[in-house]
Image (cartoon, grey):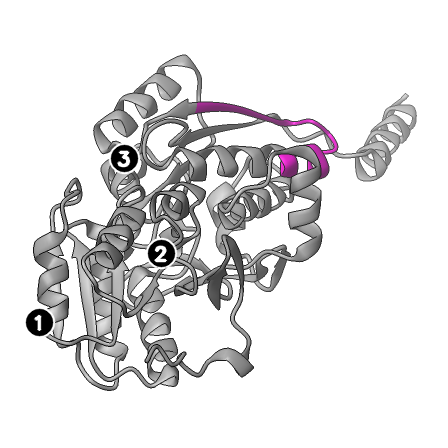
């Protein structure tokens, strides 16, 4: 009898050793994107890219997700977060924009919800163990833009900057990276729409390039007003330059403007345009497509944060993702930004052969 029981025990152990592990539980993702308002084209592209990634990579259909619209308004972001967490238990939170992410990050961190934030402002993640930014810092973006301006040989750079946590950090990076400091740093309110005073100061200081670091919906307005007032200099900027809305409102004044931005593979862009209308915000779509791929690789709901922080040379359509953690506690994924240029409404790579600044005489 004892021998029989022992054999049954051994068989049970053997079965446990070779049986397949239980399937992972459902992963519940809450995404807060600007699906309306001034940044809606970016938010809609981000949503579309995420849905593409889920369809392609979530083969077991174990990722559940809910979208909420914050209109790129931090107050709305908090309301959207509360709505998501009231309706169900969130395993991972996705946010877009430095302002909205700054508003909700301390709450999500305190409630120990792993958060992936598309935010350039390092303060979103500094000192918050549960928050990881989905891109390089705004300061690094500004430094890369400054390096591009240095290569083009600009010596009298003027900067107009919205008083926003993200754009102010980009502006700081530009000032740090320029060989010669900006001759003018002009600060305006984020909602400002009349830029005549700023443009006149650019003309008086005889700038040879104006860096436009304004909020979505304001960049094209500035460029159009500048041309109308006779400021015929080159324009430069950052990630917000990829905008159909701003290009149209500029009345083509943004043609030949240079900027830095992540750059998805042509294969992704082609696949996106087969499914959705073409968009200048293809970079926003690509980053959340890659985020969906990252989430699909999580092998269980246990230690989600640890898995997210173990990312190293992860292949994405924007390049290779590697998790970084700085001495001051910033936490983010690093992947390449590239010099780009607007050509007749198209957003293309700025090749080395075209780095020399144009002759506007």
* Picture residue at 59% right of the left edge, 40% below the top: 278
**Hey, which quadrant is residue 292 in on the image?**
top right
Report which residue position mark 1 lands on: 204
Q: Is residue 213 above or below residue 305?
A: below
* Mark 3 and mark 1: Cα distance apart in space: 42 Å
**Residue closer to the observer: 145 or 17:** 145
| Front label number (3 vs 1) | 1
Which comes before the other along the chain, label 3 or label 1? 3
**According to the image, label 3 marks what residue?**
104
Q: Is residue 90 in view?
A: yes
Identify residue for label 2.
253
**Start and end of the magenta stretch?**
52-67
- The answer to whether residue 111 is above or below residue 248 is above
Label 2, label 3: how far apart the Cα atoms are: 36 Å
Element at label 3: helix
Secondary structure of the residue carrying tag 1 is: helix
Distance, label 2 to label 1, CA atoms, is: 20 Å
Res 245 → quadrant? top left
Q: Residues within 10 Å of mark 1 (few under 14, many from 20)?
A: few
**Left or right, residue 153 beside residue 41:** left
- Check residue 94 for magenta coloring: no
């Amino acid at each position: 009898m004892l021998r029989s029981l022992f054999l049954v025990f051994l068989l049970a152990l053997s079965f446990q050793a070779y049986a397949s592990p239980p399937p992972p539980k459902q992963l519940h993702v809450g995404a807060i994107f600007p699906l309306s308002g001034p940044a809606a084209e970016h938010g809609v592209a981000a949503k579309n890219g995420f849905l593409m990634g889920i369809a392609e990579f979530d083969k077991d259909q174990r990722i559940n997700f809910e979208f909420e619209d914050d209109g790129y308004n931090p107050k709305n972001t908090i309301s959207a977060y509360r709505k998501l967490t009231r309706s169900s238990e969130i395993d991972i939170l996705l946010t877009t924009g430095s302002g909205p992410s700054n508003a909700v990050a301390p709450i999500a961190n305190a409630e120990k919800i792993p958060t992936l934030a598309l935010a350039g402002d390092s303060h979103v993640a500094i000192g918050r163990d549960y928050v990881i930014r989905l891109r390089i810092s705004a300061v690094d973006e500004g430094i890369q833009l400054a390096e591009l301006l240095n290569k083009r040989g600009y010596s009298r750079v003027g900067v107009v900057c919205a008083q926003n946590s993200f754009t102010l950090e980009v502006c700081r990076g530009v000032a740090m990276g320029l060989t010669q400091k900006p001759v003018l740093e002009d600060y305006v309110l984020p909602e400002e729409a009349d830029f005549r005073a700023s443009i006149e100061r650019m003309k008086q200081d005889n700038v040879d390039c104006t860096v436009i670091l304004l909020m979505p919906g304001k960049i094209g307005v500035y460029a159009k007003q500048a041309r109308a007032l006779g400021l015929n200099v080159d324009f430069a900027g950052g990630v917000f330059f990829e905008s159909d809305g701003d290009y149209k409102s500029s009345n083509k004044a943004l043609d030949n403007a240079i900027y830095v931005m992540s750059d998805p593979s042509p294969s992704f862009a082609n696949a996106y345009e087969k499914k959705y209308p073409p968009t200048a915000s293809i970079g926003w779509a690509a980053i959340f497509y890659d985020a969906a791929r990252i989430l699909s690789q999580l092998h269980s709901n246990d230690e989600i944060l640890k898995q997210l922080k173990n990312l190293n040379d992860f292949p994405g359509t924007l390049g290779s993702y590697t998790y970084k953690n700085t001495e001051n506690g910033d936490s983010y994924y690093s992947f390449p930004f590239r010099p780009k240029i607007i050509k007749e409404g198209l957003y293309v790579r700025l090749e080395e052969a075209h780095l020399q600044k144009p002759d506007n005489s």
